[in-house]
Image: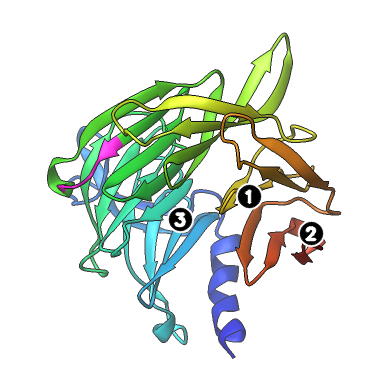
Amino acid sequence: MMRSRIFPYALRLLVSGVMGLAVLAQISTGVAFAESFGVAGHLGGTPNVLVAHAGYLYLGSGPELAVLDPATANSDMRVGYIVFHDMVQDIALTPDGPYAGVAAQSAGFWLVDLRQPTSPRAVTFLETPALGVAIAGHYAYTAGDTRLQIVDIAQPEYASLAGVMEVPGSAQKVKVYGDHAYVAQNVCRDGTCYAGLLVVDVSDPTTPREVGMVDPTGGAGIEDIVAVDNTIYIATGSDGLCVINAANPTLPVETEAINTPGTAWAVAVANDLVYVADGLGGLFLLRQEH
């Protein structure tokens, strides 16, 4: 039943085009596109990222962060939204859920107050390209351009930059587990580009430092990262799923490379199963044989 109710809404999102419809007005509480114009309304966009918390879904759809209430799926699930002036690439929630970190490409990193789901409100802005975001404790980690940046969000209204680390290539995504951040990057040298995963010690967020690096098989790109204990699962697009043993963070080692038939866009791990969203290849459930 849930699938049949959600599908029409998802279809409306998919057919609405890349940027959807934006309504501009001279006076607006939305994000300003120019000095005299702000966003008064927005509809549609390509879904990029979806996270869930406390009965709500938070969808990055084109340039907007939409708050969805599945309980209203018989009508329009969107109960609130906020628009940025570039595509929402990643969303991370604080542990208690009232704030979301948003990576919005050239529009930068934003911290959004979600305490009123019908009217999400931006409270912090970091003027830097942001493609990936993670939140651990009271720090937000953003990946973009050639940097990993760490923002102290203990006081959301007065968030401040705590630490910065330059990376060799273009930082695309970041996940944080324990004292380590895993940063996906694209590196181009002499006309050849490949994907790499950096292991960064963030035990002191003010002085992040690279301690290890591994290049997944194929090098097509890194679309998603999940870490469970000392094992890192990487969705590498057209190259499938890559598994890394990071028991020694200074010397991570690839242990498996699984070439799925489609395009591995996302990966999740639960109950000893690895789930791979494989594009046209469908959803794969993999069990590691011991």
Q: In the rendered view, would you say 261 is above or below 239?
A: below
Please name the residue that numbered disc 2 is placed on: 280
Q: Residue 285 at x, y = what percent?
A: 75, 68
Q: Residue 150 at x, y = what percent?
A: 33, 34
Query: Which residue is outermost to the top?
Result: 190
Hey, what amino acid is under mark 1? Answer: Thr
The image's mark for residue 60 is 3
Hey, what amino acid is under mark 2? Answer: Leu
Q: Which of marks 3 and 2 is nearer the N terminus?
A: 3
290 part of magenta stretch: no
Q: Where the N terminus falls, by quadrant?
A: bottom right
Q: Residue 156 at x, y = what percent?
A: 18, 48
Please name the residue that numbered disc 1 is placed on: 231
How far apart are the alpha carbons under marks 1 and 2? Answer: 27 Å
Give the structural element (helix, strand or loop) at label 2: helix
**Residue at 21% of width from left, 68% of height from top?**
116
- Boundaries of the magenta span: 151-155
In this picture, residue 68 sits left or right of residue 275: left
Q: State which mark lies toward you, 1 or 3.
A: 1
Q: Residue 128 at x, y = what percent?
A: 35, 28
Q: Residues within 10 Å of mark 1 (few under 14, many from 20)?
A: some
